[in-house]
Amino acid sequence: QVQLVESGGGLVQAGGSLRLSCAASGRTFSPEIMGWFRQAPGKEREFVAAIRWSGGSTDTADSVKGRFTISRDNAKNTVYLQMNSLKPEDTAVYYCAIRRWGAGNYDYWGQGTQVTVSS
């Protein structure tokens, strides 16, 4: 079992910044990749960013490239999403997820944290 707990969401004005955190725990925590996804009301969940736990290479969606940065702290089993220059269209519930070695897909998800950007 793996537990993922997101924090750091909230209400911010357009142009502002937030940093999301996702703390992972559990006996079977063996991450290959950790990622952030988001889901806005009435829309499908979409990929935001991901990071390889070993090596730290990253991938970021075009819609947030240059504004959002994913990072990790291996010692704390925590992944972060630094969000700058926020736009109202970034409003969504943000989810952290893990793809464990051998899983083939993201197999554990957090409960989500709300990010609301006002214009």
Image: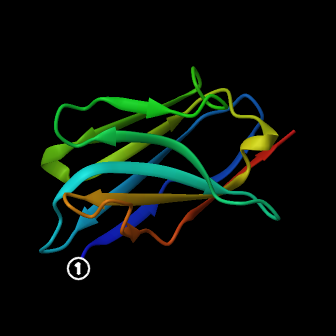
User: Is 75 placed above or below 44 here?
Assistant: above
Residue nearest the viewer, comparing 13 with 41? 41
Task: Please name the residue shown 78% across and 34% down the image.
Answer: 14
Looking at the picture, which amino acid does disc 1 mark? Answer: Gln
Q: Is residue 101 left or right of residue 95?
A: left
Mark count: 1
Q: Which residue is mark 1?
A: 1
Q: Is residue 66 left or right of residue 44?
A: left
* Residue farthest along the right direction in this orientation: 119
Question: Measured from the top left, where is residue 64 in percent x and y?
Answer: 62, 31
Question: Measured from the top left, where is residue 36 in percent x and y?
Answer: 48, 50
Q: Is residue 59 left or right of residue 99?
A: right
User: Is 38 placed above or below 66 here?
Assistant: below
Label 1, secondary structure: give it: loop
The image quadrant that residue 3 belongs to is bottom left
Task: Please name the residue shown 70% across and 55% down the image.
Answer: 92
Residue nearest the viewer, comparing 108 with 25? 108
Residue nearest the viewer, comparing 117 with 103? 103
* Residue farthest along the bottom direction in this orientation: 1
Picture quarter with the C terminus = top right
Instruction: Report the coloring of the rendering.
Output: rainbow
